Image (cartoon, rainbow, N blue to C red):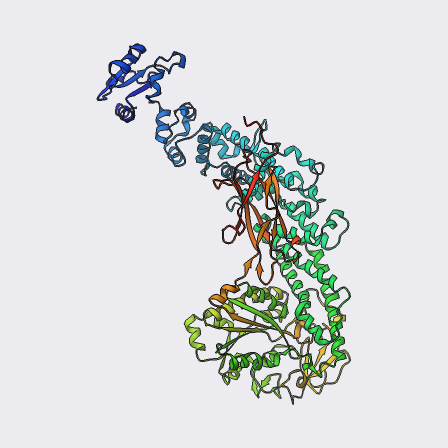
Amino acid sequence: MQIDQLEQGLTKKFSQTNIVFWYDPEQSFLDVIDQLSLPDVQLVNMAHESALEVKKWILRDNPQQSYLLYFPSSEPKIEDNWLLDVSFYSGQFYADNASILLAELGIKTMSLREHIKVRASFFNKQRTESLKRRITENETEQSLDLKMIAVLATNEPILNNILMELFSQYAGNIDTDGDSNDDNELMLLDLLSKYGLLDSFWQAVEHQFGYASEEKSVSDFLYKLFCTELSIHIDVSESEKAWASANVIPSASGRASASAFMLEWRDSKRFSQDHDAIAKVISCELDIPSRCNGYSPLTLQECYTFEAVEQTVIRGLVRYLLHDDSVEQILKMTPVDFESVISKRLSGHWSEVRVEYAAIYQALKSADNLFRLRRKYADGFNYPDAKSMFTAYSEELFLFDQHYRLFNQYTDRVQSKGGDILRRIDDAVESLYVDWYLYELGLAWDVLLEREDLLENWNSLGTRLQNNFYAHQVKQTLDTSKTIKRVFVIISDALRYEVADELKMRLNSERRFKCELKSMQGVLPSYTQLGMASLLPHSELDYDANSATVLVDGKSTSGLDNRNNVLQRHNGIAISSKDLLSWTQKQGREVIQDKSVVYIYHDTIDAIGDKGGTEHKTFEACHDAVEELKDLVAKAINNLNANRVLVTADHGFLFQQKGLTQPEKTGLGGQPTGAFEAKKRYILGRSMPNHEQCWHGSIANTTTKGIGSDVDFLLPKGANRFHFVGGARFVHGGAMPQEICIPLLDVQALRGKKAAANEKQKVGIITEKSTIRLVNQIEKIRFIQTNAVGDSYIERKVTAVIKDSQGNPVSSEETLLFDATSDNMTERTRDARFKLIGCDFNRNENYQLFVIDSATNTVVEQFPRPVMIDLLDRDDFGF
């Protein structure tokens, strides 16, 4: 050290005190002591002076003088220190490298000098600067080492973060065969060993997790972490999971900390993939698939340690739905248990990182809903008349079609990734839907059609008629409303009633929309040209004499331009949905500024389903259509200032995944005499002969304004087809409820107070017990969802955590999804198992349970709630 540096350090010290002690046991500065220039300071080399004499100078002879007492020796023991009392109100100067380094770091605790000396090789310029950014003045040996370790790990001085960095290196060393290398190839461990910090690292791990193996290693510690968490969350007796006990951390606080760390690791966006890679290796080595195979979904519902556990849960749920009694404990589940397990898994790790698992659970929910409906209608469909059955379809029976569609929609996503887990349940669903539902529905409906001679009296159902759509839904509104001056109509080709119901739910989840779904009775045959024509303003409806073109009031309705010509006579306009979406707000308003009726034509479902090469994508097209229609409604309301938007369709459709067989074909032995258009579900003609296997009707009867038309039609009964050419799974044109129950969505724009009043609330949450007392390191808290998910309330995803009075988390963060639809509150419970971090808890401390909404990051109403932590195995002596 240069003399000027010594002088600067001493001058600074004398600005704080008049007496400074300087011990130099190595006598490193003995030769330069006399060269120091310190004005007004008397330098005393204590090697040449009596301690008592110097004490006399300080206390009696010249107490105002500043003294530098230099000792070319170590500080004496207390009993040998004649200047001990003076040292209490004096300062001490350190000139060794460790002391200077502590001063540079801003650490006042000079007792850390020896600690720093041992780690001297750590302190190059770059690492020292990095350490300075993490340092506080009151460091301990443990805290200083942790921050030095953090510098080497290029992370925060938090042990969990450092471990995740280390495990990331470990995961990076896993080779293509799934084998990991030993600790010698971990760069961070090499650095810790090089700079004397390895023992401190393992001591920190032992302190937090209770990991105290004789031969510590990262591999062994990882085994302990994974097995500990697995053991905690498998809800079976200890004897049934004894195979994992050898690797379970022994202390309760260590187990809780380990489980909390594993949850944090999986939730880390940066490091979760490392968890998954290591989990895969350990899962294979422990043979988790076979060990967990006999466990029920209930016993595994809170365990997310291994992907193999996720797959075991799914297999169990599939067996439950199929009533597979080969695994007895699986059948002990209740429907509420089934719903609860799926809710937990949907908000869990593997569903978050692998969309296939989320799709599987959604598919299982849909399958369960379908099976429940099947049990409800075990005796088939029995209604006194066609009107009652049509009403029943629009109120509940359509759910068969919706759940079937959603099941297949999610199953397709899984199978597109190569997953085959749903194959067995897929067969059961297909059999239920095609062999039972479509058959029984068609049988019951055909009986009523024949009994009431409905094709001759098609308007006798007494419902809204598609053919009266313009007169009753558009014109009447414009004529009677004082506020609505323009009506927007979105016509989506083949928008089936059940798909419109999903759209309704999506729209009603928006604050600015209020949507009501009604049904209309469609025209026959239920196909595009006739359905589209019936929605236009008209007095008469018929066919061109030389083609299958449908005419309204003598004008063609084929294509957008012809429909626009019809609408122009009623101050209307026809546009395509693609044009609307491409317009700016200014362009759109200019186009419609003087129009009172705007028809918007959308074609996604029919465009995909009505082609043999793409009909297998029908349900995917339904999903896309819902998203597109939602955007169209929003565009009309937000950009074009619409107050009322009607969404409807030309017809519905039938669809089944399973290929059709010969019994599902209605053979006519050739095209009937007089036919001019023959499709899979209808034949159009004039003066066609009757056929006992077909419905024979007249356009004049099935379209109220087809009076005088000489066109008749043939329809196959039930869900049969005339032929299978060009694809036969997606069809329309017949008289089945799925084809002729036409949706009428009435969407109103809400603004101001009405919009605020219409905003859907998230479900409320409370704890089952008003007083929460935790007596174990790992405790379950039960929550109750106060409202059922439905028209008024939407689901809520939350994170729950316990914090101390300073706001520091003292437990794991648990994620919960509250999505129960049951009206019974006892069936709307969710459990969270909290893992307390550490063991130093005070029963008198003010702990609180926070529940935070995941979407808004705000505390949920009714929270925080007080929590008492009174551990049974705490140290009652406190010393």
Residue 102, compared with residue 244, is above or below; it is: above
Quarter holding the N terminus is top left
Q: Is residue 446 left or right of residue 11?
A: right
The image position of residue 566, as x and y in percent, is 53, 84
Residue 149, compared with residue 791, is above or below; it is: above
The image position of residue 738, as x and y in percent, is 67, 71
Residue 2, image quadrant: top left
The image position of residue 440, as x and y in percent, is 75, 69
Q: Which of 726 and 152 is in front in this view?
A: 152
Residue 813, compared with residue 136, is above or below; it is: below
Q: Is residue 217 left or right of residue 301?
A: left
The image position of residue 418, as x and y in percent, is 63, 54
Residue extending furthest bottom?
Answer: 708
Residue 99, image quadrant: top left
Task: Report how many numbered discs are placed on residues in the image.
Answer: 0
Q: Which of 10 and 265 is in front in this view?
A: 10
Q: Nearer the viewer, residue 744 or 830?
A: 830
The answer to whether residue 554 is seen in the rendering is: yes
Q: Is residue 797 left or right of residue 56?
A: right
The answer to whether residue 24 is seen in the rendering is: no
Residue 144, compared with residue 71, is above or below; it is: below
Q: Is residue 33 left or right of residue 658?
A: left
Q: Nearer the viewer, residue 831 or 324?
A: 831
